[in-house]
Amino acid sequence: QKDYWPAKEYIEEALQLYKNSAAKDADTNNPYIAISLNNLGVVYESMEQHLEAEKRYTEALAIYRKLARNNPQAYNHYVAVTLNNLGYLYIGKVEPEYGRAEANCKESLDIYRALAAENPQAWNPFLALSLHNMARFYQQKYPNKTLSIQLVEEAIKILDQCSDDYELVREVRNKAKRVLEIWQEN
């Protein structure tokens, strides 16, 4: 069992400093508040404190959505990451909330589709990862073979257009191929 308390304490301390500074300069500090909240969500989720994780992710998401309204180019990616974190939190709870998980992951996927349409070189690997994640969701948690295979094949097609020099591309390609192998075994 890992000891997450030191990380939690450091992040909470940083969060408080950013919140204090935001009283004077919210524009500069709100992104740091959001990332600190998201990081706290990850720590709480790792500690299996799902309600605390959900609270932090939800707070981060609200800030990122506001930032993205003013600067979508800079912050839509963070909205997508936080939605994905929330989605997988809902899957991992003692009593999973698949509907909420699916909705968050689909919204994240939609954001990555839009980002990749504008800049494929930068965002296609993340789009492929999001497609893979949805394919695994439909494989493991909410079985739908047809949709899962469709999503993972789309991910592989996108990855085939990406450079293998990028570790994320190689990693997601291997994971995507594994999803197909599992379906073929069943």
Image (cartoon, helix red, strand yellow):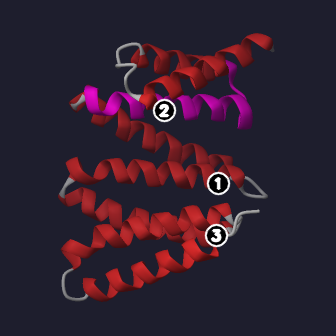
Q: Which one is in front in this view, the residue at disc 2 or the one at disc 1?
A: 2
Q: Amino acid at mark 1?
A: Tyr
Could you tell me which secondary element the residue under label 2 belongs to?
helix
What span is colored magenta in the figure? 121-145
Q: Position of residue 167 (x, y in %)?
A: 44, 29
Q: Is residue 67 left or right of residue 81?
A: left
> Pointer 1: residues within 10 angstroms few (<14), some, or many (20+)?
many
Q: Is 128 within the magenta?
A: yes
Q: What's the distance in space between the residues labelled 2 and 1, CA to CA?
A: 19 Å
Secondary structure beneath disc 1? helix
In the displayed structure, does residue 8 sit left or right of residue 64? right
Q: Point out residue 53 in the picture as x, y percentages from the top left corner.
A: 59, 67
Mark pair 3, 1: CA separation: 21 Å
Q: Where residue 101 sits: x, y (%)? A: 60, 48
Image quadrant occupied by the N terminus: bottom right
Q: Which residue is mark 2?
A: 129
- Of the numbered discs 2 and 1, the one sitting upstream in the chain is 1
> How dense is the environment of label 2, judged by Cα within 10 Å: few (below 14), some, or many (20 and up)?
many
Residue 55, quarter of the rendered image: bottom right
Q: Which residue is mark 1?
A: 90
User: In front: mark 2 or mark 3?
Assistant: 3
